[in-house]
Image (cartoon, helix red, strand yellow):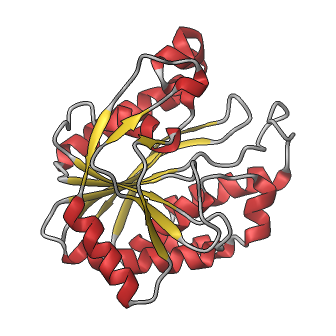
Amino acid sequence: MTLIFSGIAAHTPILMPKIGKVEGLKIIEKTSQSMKQLEQELLAARPDIIVIISPHGEMLVDAITINFNSKYVSRFDEFGDLVTKDEWRPATMLIDRLREDFKRLHLPLTLTSEDFLDYGSSVPLHYLTESLKEVRIVPLRPSSELGLKAHFEIGTALKSEIMDSTSRIAVIASADLSHRVGEDSPSGLSPKGVAFDDKIVELLKERNPIGILDVDDDWAKEAQACGAAPLALLFGLLDGMNVEPQIFSYEKPLGVGYLVASIKTS
């Protein structure tokens, strides 16, 4: 088995020291500490490759995308951080095999080429690869319009290629949950937002990845959960496997649900 680790990471830019600063990091201290815990778990798993699934950046309406570039650089200019610059290299062979397999299976995958990674990828990778300088990455983005069921099915196809690989692969869903779980949420509190976050936590505790299909697309949109599609991809990949989830933290101090969890497979 070559899927050696998977997890769910928060990606709020406040996690970045030069953006959140001391005050911001204190507000989301549970999440910050949990990201460090997730890093230690990932480090112990010794991955060769990290597939990072981010819901930010340019997405296609009818296909998931993989950014295939000679190298990737983080950029946080839009958040006022002109200093932090992390770099990563692509998992070239895995990306090429995914492209060939998805083409053969008539699955919607498009390759793009971008120098800079969006913050949904860069924030988790900043935390998770600090001691994994040689790790290669596959930056994957969901579609903006394909539903959760379609993403779940693509995840099951992704599993086949990962399991056939000779590399040690980790898959991380960069997935902030509902943006409507508090009175101070950008679009206000929504009961469906609270219910969405409760549902994801419940699915992890019950080891029930396929239960994501109980969430219809209207529910996810009402909840404004940017992490819904990355979670559907990850849960599709994990469906049928013996999973051992561990939730490190869930909090919503700013009206957005931040979840950090590891999911070991056997």
Q: Please give the name of the residue rendered at 29% of the width and 51% of the height, measured from the top-left corner.
A: 137
What x and y, as percent, mark residue 27? 61, 19
Residue 73 versus residue 4 in the image, above or below: above
- Viewer-closest of 228 and 240: 228
Quarter of the image for residue 39 reads top left
In this view, which residue lies farthest toward the left?
166
Q: Please give the name of the residue rendered at 50% of the width and 52% of the height, measured from the top-left corner.
A: 54
Q: Is residue 223 visible?
A: yes
Quadrant where the C terminus is found in the figure:
bottom left
- Viewer-closest of 108 and 228: 108
- Viewer-closest of 64 and 219: 64
Q: Please give the name of the residue rendered at 85% of the width and 42% of the height, measured from the top-left corner.
A: 189
Left or right? Give the position of 56 relative to 5. Answer: right
What x and y, as percent, mark residue 221? 77, 60
Q: Please give the name of the residue rendered at 57% of the width and 48% of the height, measured from the top-left corner.
A: 57
Quarter of the image for residue 248 reads top left
- Viewer-closest of 79 and 247: 79
Left or right? Give the position of 29 relative to 66. Answer: right
Left or right? Give the position of 196 relative to 149. Answer: right
